[in-house]
Image (spheres, rainbow, N blue to C red):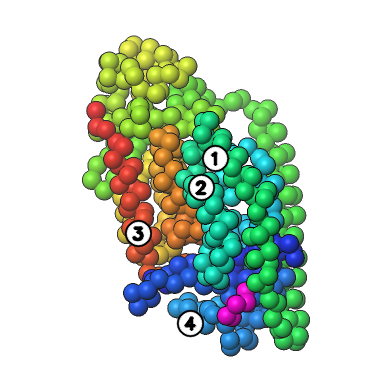
Amino acid sequence: MAQDIIPIELGLPQGDVVTLWAPRWREDGEEWEAFLGDEDDLYAFPDAAHLAAFVRTSEQHDLLDHPAWDSVPALNVPELIPDDDHSYDLVGVPELVAEEPDSWTIAELAEIVGIVRSLADVCELDDVHEVLDACEGFSLLEQGRLPFTGREGEALWNDLSKAVSEKWDIVLDAIDGLVTVPDVDAGLLEQTAEELAAFHEESAAAEVAQAEALGTAGDEDDDEEEEEDVPVGFWGEVGIDPIKIITAGAEYYTLRCYLDDKAVFLGSEGEIDVFNSEKALLKAIADGKELVDTDLSEVSTWEEVLTKATAGELEIEVDAENTYVLSGLDDDIAAGPESIDPTQLELAVELITDAADWAEDDSVESALAANESLGWLVSFVLRPDPTRLEPSAPFDAEQGAWRKLVETFENRLTVV
């Protein structure tokens, strides 16, 4: 399978540099991975203008045989600017491990260690492998926060921090020593530098226009605040949402709320109680017996829901933003980004991510990470950016990974 060639930024002791990375792809029955370079050299550049000038003219480097290379020389300069998901601050790792091991810190560190492992694999950096293999914590980062919780998790994080403090310079020196900045054509560089400057000017102008628009919107919001508040309805008042889930074979109804931005579903122990109709859900709430031990019963407003249901005054109303359509997305993913409805995908990702987080399952977070093919495709669809390379077909692996996530989610559903 031909994966993309992705612009990346590396924060190294010599400064921030940009280069190209080809994540693992299969060709002729073998698996490959590569970076822009030649033999023992990693080609990297101070900015996208230098990178563009190089790829438009170079006839000797390790990515020439990549299945997607033919499209790279035709890219404009903005398309070669690494996005935030592919900017790796290797120099900042000591500061990162000095923080508390929350989900964001661990996710960022996992992405950095992932690209470091790839560089070590491709460039045969044995010293780097020795550093990463000597501490168990490095290999557990992809599992998220769970391995670093509790007393044992705290000790694991401390060991990782100590390893970084004592040995991370070995990693930095090894990778820094690979970098070579090839010469580029001066005339072409002048042209690409102008392209880059024009892009930055346009971006700055767009930010100013957006700020002005937000200021106008703020004035409008102030005017609206003076108007009478619009009723939010009973469900809005209690902070619980009826939701509808449409799978390939059925439609289900259940409830969900958010506490401290974390989802809580009607259910327990990672299993979501669902019903085949709004009427069945309403009857179960009014009866109350089957829903006594659910996680939602611990929510402070749950008694208000039971009281209204018992009095026969409760109605189940599902808003459009709480309707999740899972059916058909796998086929759309197989057809590529242009076939995917961003709204449907965003809602589906929200649902399966909420469910996994509630169940303390890190598999969704791992599958949707930016360095995974499915995560890259989802990110491309949900956060469109003209500077990013479009994922390339075939999308069999992405479809398979998505189907696995949906299957895992559907296995959480218990029809009551």
Which residues are drawn in magenta? 37-42
Crowdedness near tag 2: few (<14), some (14–19) or many (≥20) residues, C-alpha within 10 Å = few
Pointer 4 or 3: first along the chain: 4
Q: Is residue 407 above or below residue 204?
A: above
Q: Mark on residue 136?
A: 2
Q: Position of residue 42 (x, y in %)?
A: 62, 74
Above or below: residue 151 compared with residue 50: above
Q: Characterize the local packing of mark 3: few (<14), some (14-19) or many (20 or more) Cα atoms within 10 angstroms.
A: many
For mark 1, what is the residue? Answer: 156
Mark 2: secondary structure: helix
Q: Amino acid at mark 1?
A: Leu
Residue plotted at (62% across, 86% down): 58
Which residue type does callout 2 highlight? Glu
The residue beneath circle 3 is 399
For marks 4 and 3, give the CA distance: 26 Å
Q: Quadrant of residue 313?
A: top left
Residue 164 seen from this side: yes
Q: Which residue is mark 4?
A: 65
Q: CA distance from mark 4 to mark 1?
A: 42 Å
**Element type where label 3 sits in the image:** helix
Q: Are the residues tagged 2 and 1 within 8 Å (C-beta)? A: yes
Which numbered disc, 1 or 3, marks the residue closer to the eye?
1
Foreground mark, 4 or 1, reads 1
Query: Is-magenta flag for residue 401?
Result: no
Q: CA distance from mark 3 to mark 2?
A: 32 Å
* Quadrant (top left/top right/bottom left/bottom right) for the C terminus: top left
Can you give x and y, in whole percent of width and height, for residue 51 in the image? 66, 75
Graded by Cα atoms within 10 Å as few (under 14), some (14 to 19) or many (20 or more), the crowding at tag 4 reads few
- The answer to if 41 sits in the magenta stretch is yes
